[in-house]
Image (cartoon, rainbow, N blue to C red):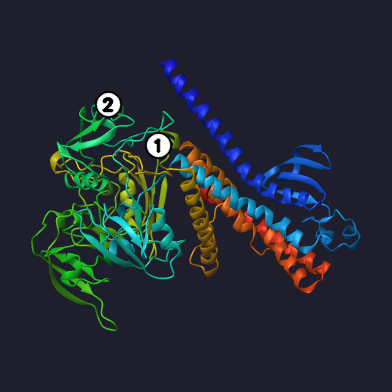
Amino acid sequence: MEVVLTSLLLGTLTGKIANIAMVALGLGLVIFFHELGHFAVAKWCDVKVERFSIGFGPIIYSFKYGETEYALSIIPFGGYVKMLGQDDVDPSQLSSEEIALDPRSYSAKPVYQRMGIISAGVIMNIITGMLFFAFAFRLGVASTPCIVGTAVPGMPAWESGIQPGDVIHKINGNETTSFMDIIRSSAFSDGDITMEGTHLNGEKFEVNVTPDQTGTRPQIGLLPAQSLQIPVYQDPNERITSKGTAAASAEPRFLPGDTIKTIDGQKIENYAQLQRTYAAKSSETLKTGVVREGTPDTEVVEIEVKNNPFRTLGLWMEIGPIESIQEGSPADRAGLKVGDKITHIDGQDVGKALNPLRLPNYFSGRAGETIPIVVNRKQDGAQPTEVNLNVVPLDNPAWLEHPVFSNTPLAVGSLGIAFHLIPTVLKVEEESPAAKAGIKPNALIKKIKILYPENETAADWAPIPEVTYEFDDKNKNWANAFWEMQVRPGWPVELTFSQDGKIVEKKINPWVNPKQEPDEQWSLPVRGIRLQSLREIQQAESMGQALGMGVQYTTNSAKDIYLTLRSLITGRVSPMELSGPVTIAKVAYEVAHDGYAQLLLFLGFLSVNLAVLNFLPIPVLDGGHMVFLCWEGITRKRPNEKVLTAATYVGMIFVLGLMIFVLYLDIFLRALS
């Protein structure tokens, strides 16, 4: 056993070193080809090249060949070619008459030659980017198909009626090729986007969706589907089932590479069906049939998986107004409106006789029945009025759509509504953890921290972190906090609340109500099985087709970068979405795990990104130099030295400031968090 484990660990370590080396080589090549473009055209124009450097700052290693020094510098965020008469640190050389007298200086060359030298790096990156893409598609690129895994409650796609399992065929009349098309269209669209697709039942649909603008970028709230296969991780310590869940204790054990085929003998064909089946039978022990990796499909191993009961504090919170209503849903047909607050259901008080957190189960369990409800409706400029309505719920499993993000409202899928929970306690269950902690009705929850269990650390639960939620008029995310408690079984919480005029802190352990029978337990719609992302391979049949795909991907990537820049300028996309060198290296390392094709695809995008950004009209960058050359070509005069120097320093300050900003995002907002 020790030998096997040692071999696995050595294999993992060797793989990591190989990936790091591959990433370093790939990123270095992107920079190298850019500088090679400048270098080659400069030599062709007989310009004296004094230094060719990969990286900036102090030189780590260098050697001289001919008249040029070739160097590797300490800051690996780019590179430069130092020519006689051209120096970004000393821009006065560009307007120096003395240097211009040297026929081999950059400044002595005609404008068209200098334009060729400056643009050569960008052109080289476009060419190499296209080749990176072409080789990637020839090998076969794994992409995420346009199949919906989750429609986030309260978001535009959910409101339009898009459901898990739906396939999106067209966006704004254009055929989709991967799930990235959905993300791209949402982020860059100026208005509504039109989506055409097929529901899981085969019915065609067409909807208009207005992207939500409240986050750091416009989005419609769709997440991709997963496969039915458990991943095979390179790291042998990576969990394939979530710690503390029913799947983690199932017998026989789930193994890496298992593919789910049946549940209680029922054939499972896709992720949406798997989700729905687990949610519909949430309180039952289910036999999950899997096919082990490398065995025939006929050899199905049945694994008994118990239910995952909800862990609660025993608190009943106040229901908030309806935030969202799905088009054509029972709630929509019944006349419910956004802003309505449900006060009574079947004559029972919501919050005192009915727990708002259990309304998804209440309505799901009464599918097809006519249920009377009372809502408090605000009228413009008038006092709120009570409105009596009747709803007929659909047969949709409870908690199938769970509040996965902070500020995601709680959805009642069988009605098609979503609402927040106000963190005011209306009821405390007898003998519950909250009751034992002394929490009473009318207490106001201010903050909740979900903490690692005693004597356990981040290493025991990676990658799941501790989380803290603060509640106020803007952050009404009790439903999401409650969901995060469920994905952290056995974790204690620290509640901060105001009660009787005092601020109180209490550490509480959530419980599973012991009075509930196992088959009657309020249970989660998931069992804790981790599944691999759904992927399909896009592969060119010939090198000619691969080159065509490379050209198309290069064009689309350049267009996306310009659209991103436009969205940043107009404020549609937040600067917080930017990534720096740390994130780029991290993503490249992760992509390298997926093989050469995915790494080549990433390097292609990086090459195009470098080309586009370098050609922006910012002094210090190639685009800034091109602006001054255009001025010189039109006016037949060299730029004024003072103007040139001032512009260069402004550009340098801007670029350095941007670098510091993205490094801050990388390190403090991403890596450390």
Label 1 neighbour load within 10 Å: few <14, some 14-19, many 20+? some
- Residue 8 locus on image (x, y percent): 45, 23
Left or right? Give the position of 345 relative to 612.
left
Rendering quarter of residue 185: bottom left
Q: Which amino acid does the dot numbered 1 rest on? A: Trp
Which residue carries the number 1 mark? 461
Q: Secondary structure at mark 2?
A: loop
Query: Counting residues from the N terminus, which is met first, the one under dot 2 or under dot 1?
Result: 2
- In the image, residue 154 sits, relative to residue 636, either above or below, namely above
- In the image, residue 611 sits, relative to residue 193, either above or below, namely above
Res 663 seen here: no
Rendering quarter of residue 417: bottom left
The Cα–Cα distance between marks 2 and 1, rounded to whole angstroms, is 31 Å
Residue in view at x 40 percent, y 42 percent: 464
Total residue callouts: 2
Which residue carries the number 2 mark? 295
Q: Nearer the viewer, residue 442 or 234?
A: 234
Nearer the camera: disc 2 or disc 1? 2
Residue in view at x 74 percent, y 66 percent: 628
Label placed on residue 381: none
Label 2 neighbour load within 10 Å: few <14, some 14-19, many 20+? few
Left or right? Give the position of 616 relative to 445.
right
Q: Nearer the viewer, residue 533 or 383?
A: 533
Q: Which amino acid does the dot numbered 2 rest on? A: Thr
Left or right? Give the position of 54 relative to 339.
right
Q: Quadrant of the N terminus?
A: top left
Residue in view at x 55 percent, y 67 percent: 569
